[in-house]
Amino acid sequence: MSDVTAGAMRPRQSPLHKVHADLGATFTDFAGWDMPVRYTSDLEEHHAVRRSAGLFDLSHMGEIRVTGPDAERYLDHALAGKLSGLTRGRAKYTLLLTPEGTVLDDLILYRLAASAEGDDRDEFLVVANASNVDADWDALSRRAEGFDVELTNESEQTALVAVQGPRSAEIITRALLASTGEARANGFAVQDISDLKYYRCLAGTFDDAPLLLARTGYTGEDGFELYVPIEKAQALWDLLVEAGGDELRPCGLACRDTLRLEAGMPLYGHELSTQTLPAQAGLGRVVALTAKEEFIGREGIENADMTGRRVLVGLAAEGRRAGRAGYPVVTASGETVGEITSGTLSPTLGHPIAMAFVDPQYADEGTELALDVRGKQVPATVVPLPFYRRA
Amino acid sequence: MTTLPENLSYTEEHEWVKVDEASNTALVGVTAFATKQLGDIVLVDLPEVGDTITAGEPMGEIESTKSVSELYAPVTGEVVEVNQTVIDTPETLNEDAYEAGWLLKVAVTELPDSLMSAEKYGELIGE
């Protein structure tokens, strides 16, 4: 089979690499990192997240800290969202745009919560895609000129572990309680974990190191992301595994991709690129054209001609034959009107799903199209995103 | 990972061949190394009984949640039997690549010289 390779490469390794190897993970190169693609079965790992909980190592992601008196004004200038005035302890999905208004990266921005331990600095944390950390760092550094801010690229020193799935709040509560035996010793009360709302975060400590605990994720389920210094990664992983027992399953990047696709979430390099305007990908709402004044990308977006530009849609098909990234989307008469950006046989729904950019006149819900799957036409219907929404 | 069965021959494209010299037929399949790399197999597309396959040419597809791969014929001959089990339950390939997960039975007209021993294939995949 042509795309199975046994070649050797020298990508970067997560601080949890040995843990994964000991678990028998299959590794894949992802954005220059050697990351677990699956441990045993990507389908079983996918279902574990939907039904119970999954544990992910996402230490390849990038983290850039922003501090200083001008931090809010700077972020409003450098990024697409209205970030000044963001309440402490909250997170926001935002975009880093090119001057032309296309997408350089999609990001989560946290405004860190005040810590109960007395460390009360007002700080922002930008979380970036691994493939874009260097480009993001360059752009964010250049955009800082003239602002009294300090940027720190903490990607190399930061480990990120995610617990995703309906059981995640209980598991994390058990784990952090077990880590100290005291209800407040992590810098927050354990009941704060289950009370934490979606897209909020807590600042605490783990094993005498800073812990950022956020109720965020990329799976379409309830879930948490935990940021700690790399030297604490294994202790945190082991603690979560211990507390999770049979309810928590280590999960690789293969199921992360099928989970986010079912949840209709874009993946940079597939649905987003420097060729994509946010509105094409359904992300117009993320760009604060009315809520703030100047920012990089505004001019590009305001001057862009949207006429005839392809837009992102969801496509659902029957059977088991999935369309894949790069496959054409065609009409019944065989005319190419779009291209798939991500596609799979949905493990949860049992039928093929895909996201695709199509000509705008074919983007209406219910439009009948077809996926050109290696020369065979598979009928598909435009459906609203997400494909899957948790109960 | 399980050791490679010694009684099979292998191709660079990660297929295996089990020749029965008495009947001049061969069972063909894909290796456990390949199915592990591909992940959960969700679809297998095979030629039909009576079709002729040619060594080194594409003969079908194997699809996992992550990717699609072409299957290359490891031998030349006519398909005399197709394993309906792997079509109905493709995950059989992940569970048992060398026994229950066979794909085709072929009336062999030509065995290519490039088929490898278990030892040689093992070196190729680094095991």
Image (cartoon, helix red, strand yellow):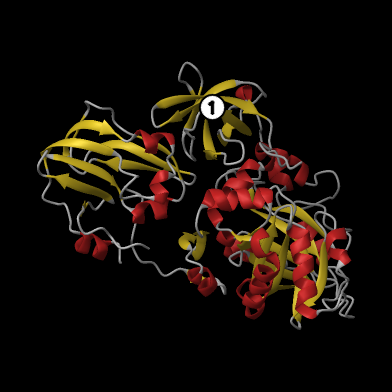
Q: Position of residue B124 (x, y in %)?
A: 26, 62
Residue in view at x 45 percent, y 24 percent: A377
The chain holding disc 1 is A
Residue A220 lies, with reference to residue A373, above or below; the image says below
Instruction: Identify which residue, B118 or A288, lies in the foreground.
Output: B118
Q: Position of residue A50 (x, y in %)?
A: 67, 48
**Can residue A203 be seen from the camera position used here?**
yes
Instruction: Identify which residue, A275 or A384, lies in the foreground.
Output: A384
Residue A211 lies, with reference to residue A328, above or below; the image says below
- In the image, taking residue A138 as reference, residue B90 lies left or right, namely left
The C terminus of chain B, quarter of image: bottom left
**Can residue A149 be seen from the camera position used here?**
no
Residue in view at x 46 percent, y 62 percent: A27
Residue that protrudes farthest toward the front in the picture = B22
Label 1 CA crowd tier, 10 Å (few <14, some 14–19, many 20+): some
Residue in view at x 9 percent, y 42 percent: B22
User: Which residue is identified by label 1?
Assistant: A318
Instruction: Identify which residue, A352 or A75, lies in the foreground.
Output: A352
Tell me where residue A227 sits by quadrant. Answer: bottom right
Residue B2 lies, with reference to residue A154, above or below; the image says above
Q: Tell me the kind of residue under disc 1.
A: Glu
Residue in view at x 19 percent, y 36 percent: B106
Residue that protrudes farthest toward the bottom in the picture = A208
- In the image, taking residue A350 as reference, residue A73 lies left or right, namely right
Tell me where residue A308 sits by quadrant. Answer: top right
